[in-house]
Image: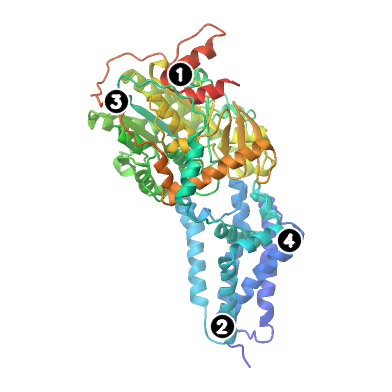
Amino acid sequence: MPFPSPISGFGLDFTRWRWAIPAVSTLLLYLLADFFAQWLFEIRIVRSRMLWDGGLLLAASWLLFLASRRVWVFLIIQTLLVTALWVGNPVKIALLGRPMMPDDIDSFPALIEVLGPLGWLALCLPLAILGGLVLANLTWRGIAAKLGLAGLAVLFAIPVLAPAPIVAAMDERFGNTTWDQRENYVWRGAALHSLQEITRELASHHPSPTRAEALAAATLRLEQPWFGNLAVPAKPRNIYVMVLESFWDPSLLTKAGYSEPPFDPRFEALWEQAGKSTALSPAFGGQTANAEFEFLCGFPVHDFTVKFESGFDNDLPCLPQVLGQLGYRTVASHPNGPGFWNRQNAYRHAGFENFWSVKDFDLDDLTGPFLSDRSLYRQIATRLDRERDDRPTLSYVMTYYGHWSYDLSEQRPAVLTAQSPNELVQRYGSVIRHKSHELADEIERITAADPEAIIIAFGDHLPTLGAKFGGYVESGLLADRFGDFTADQYAVSDATPLIVIDGKRGPLRVGSVPMFELPRLVMDLIGNSQKTLFDLARTPGDRLYRPLPEATLVYRGREVAEVCRDGDSDPECRRAADWLASVELLERDVFEGKAYALGALDQPRRSFAPLPVAKPQLPPVEMATSTPEGDADTSLVDDAISSGAVHVVQRQTQSD
């Protein structure tokens, strides 16, 4: 009797050997993909796990085959699926150090926009074709088709219905190294890895904390030692924040062989006066929105989730809203589409009064698709001045130029040569020269027009410098995979230049500061000691914690003292884990739940009466005053105390 489904592709009779089609195609495609992964990306699945991984692919393929109308369509579907998972994962590991994770779904629209036409061609089109072919080729006719569809339904339903026991069993059988997702992939393969991590994501959803749980956690966090002794400023101070795309210190690339120092000399001098302070980022090579989230809302990001895209559902007293309630005008500027990283909603939730996006700027100075920092700063300053009222201003700028792939142009040519054969390393040095030059110009402009202004500038994350961290590995800065990072290499991977200028007092030596602690520093600088959202995640005492997706770093001063991973029994790591657990509970309550914890905070109140902000006609001021040798640290701490930047500076100077 003929096979019930009309699988008659190519005009041949498959009735006698139809059972072998998915087995043969699975074997050939799996081995071919494995060959390319090893040849192109040096990713080799552990041989003892290939039977499990390939077996899972075969089971899914067999069930899909039973419910397919045409064999040739089934083979195309299977080829696209194997390419996406068994080649796509090695590509992502090579570029970003990690395989595909469930959280990547939130980042997918941003990735497509970054890649432009290539993204649509290489990612969207194949996925659209795959989905269309699956739907068009499915059939309900015949017993075999019904069995296939029922089997697929069961395969998808099992992890949804019982995720916790399934992921526990898979972790026990196949292992789970939270700090090395590349290692997880090679010990599982694409099918097992996808199933295990999707099931983990389903099992990780927790109910929102109760009022009692949230208030207890908030009270515990607010009882941490407080270093403030703040004086109310005589009048409000404008705040200028520049978050700089992929801004980092290329001089650390010792094998790059740059023809001259990459930083503009004026920026280098400022950073030296600031003690080469650094902002500790949650991101590496991408996910700018997570660095922004930390600065704006004062909570750490410690997983692969992009908080602007997922888990930021409430209007909250983040820094823009708190400053707005204190009488500030709050403006965010970024010359990209307002939907990129969901900024139009995230900025609104954070409390910005205005968001100026690409439609608000004249794209008069482009390098590649990116508006230059110089043009961006100039247009923002002109509009702020034109629309100025009697309120002080928070101007928050997220720059765009300097984004991968580090474009140069006639206006911004290659001004440095490099001995490194890595093309990204070559271009990046010149890009940083242009960015630091234009930043130095903007800082000089602000300090000349507004000598008491607070200026904060920092990089969002380190740049991407080739597959398997090529540019960093070349100079011995990083290992070629996260799982092999030493404490010193982690310290390199999360630190970007940070400058905090406290008006006429100049740059502050704030040391190494996690980005989620920067909004508390802003409040200190304006002389406001009210308990705010930012105090709920402050790290305790003389320790600084920098949670990352694969580990939590414990800083003592500028050094990473401990790298803490899941299950570590070291007392310092247990304290860090307890802190992170309470912060995670508060995060679920505040950003996704009922926000009960906000009841433990002070209601924002004005610490000054808004005054007309005149335009001082003063010459540029010196960024810092020189001090006799040996007295520099004391002088800087005194300046910091007088300006309010106490809690950060005191912790840092103990070991600086």
Q: Position of residue 296 (x, y in %)?
A: 42, 38
Instruction: Give the number of callouts.
Output: 4
Q: Tell me the element at label 3.
A: loop
Amino acid under label 1? Ile
State yes or no: discs 4 and 1 in contact (Cβ < 8 Å).
Answer: no
In three-dimensional space, the C-alpha distance between marks 2 and 1, rounded to whole angstroms, equals 74 Å
The image quadrant where one finds the N terminus is bottom right
For residue 641, which numbered disc appears in the image?
Answer: 1
Residue at the bottom extreme?
1
Image-based side of 276 in relation to 179, left or right: left
Amino acid under label 4? Arg
In three-dimensional space, the C-alpha distance between marks 4 and 1, rounded to whole angstroms, equals 59 Å
In three-dimensional space, the C-alpha distance between marks 1 and 3, rounded to whole angstroms, equals 20 Å
Q: Residue at x 59, y 63 (%)?
A: 163
The image quadrant where one finds the C terminus is top right
For residue 608, which numbered disc appears in the image?
Answer: 3
Residue bearing mark 4: 49
Using the image, determine if residue 450 lies above or below residue 95. above
